[in-house]
Amino acid sequence: MRDAQVLWELWDVIDDRFKNPVPGSYVTGLAKHEKGIDGVLEKVGEESTEFILAIKNQVPERTVAEAADLIFHLMVALRAADVSLEAVLSELAVRRR
């Protein structure tokens, strides 16, 4: 599947959880973390490390899972910092050659 629509759908859910907190929601928990944005950034760091180790250890199925975790937590961190997914994708488009 090459459909990037899933990123937009995920972004919409993340954005909605920030605007309309849902008790028990994982995203809401990150958005309302007692450490503020530091809580989300800690998750980005944790997932980055797990992704690196999966690649280093040549475990393809873990690499895919950790990449998904990392992308998800990056998106939550972007939203927490009020940076839109559109801005990031636009920057990538500018860099494309």
Image (cartoon, rainbow, N blue to C red):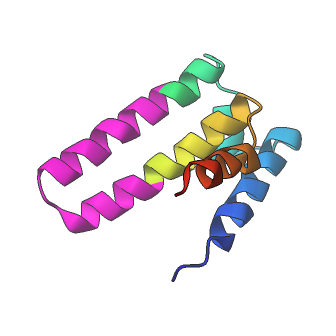
Q: Is residue 50 magenta?
A: yes
| Residue lying at the far right of the rendered structure | 20
Q: Main secondary structure of the magenta part?
A: helix
**Residue 53 percent location from the top left of the image:** 20, 44
**Residue 29 percent location from the top left of the image:** 66, 36
Please report the residue visible at 77 percent of the width from the left and 31 percent of the height from the top: 82
| Residue lying at the far left of the rendered structure | 57
Q: Which residues are magenta?
A: 42-68
**Residue 39 percent location from the top left of the image:** 55, 24
The answer to which of 34 and 38 lies nearer the viewer is: 38
| Residue lying at the far bottom of the rendered structure | 1
Task: Count the labels in the image.
Answer: 0
The answer to which of 13 and 97 lies nearer the viewer is: 97
With 46 as the anchor, is 80 left or right in this view?
A: right
Please report the residue visible at 88 percent of the width from the left and 44 percent of the height from the top: 20
Please report the residue visible at 69 percent of the width from the left and 46 percent of the height from the top: 24
Decide: is 68 above or below 87.
below
The answer to which image quadrant residue 23 occupies is top right
**Residue 83 percent location from the top left of the image:** 73, 35
Q: Is residue 71 magenta?
A: no
Decide: is 39 above or below 24.
above
With 69 as the anchor, is 16 left or right in this view?
A: right
Please report the residue visible at 57 percent of the width from the left and 30 percent of the height from the top: 40
The answer to which image quadrant residue 52 occupies is top left
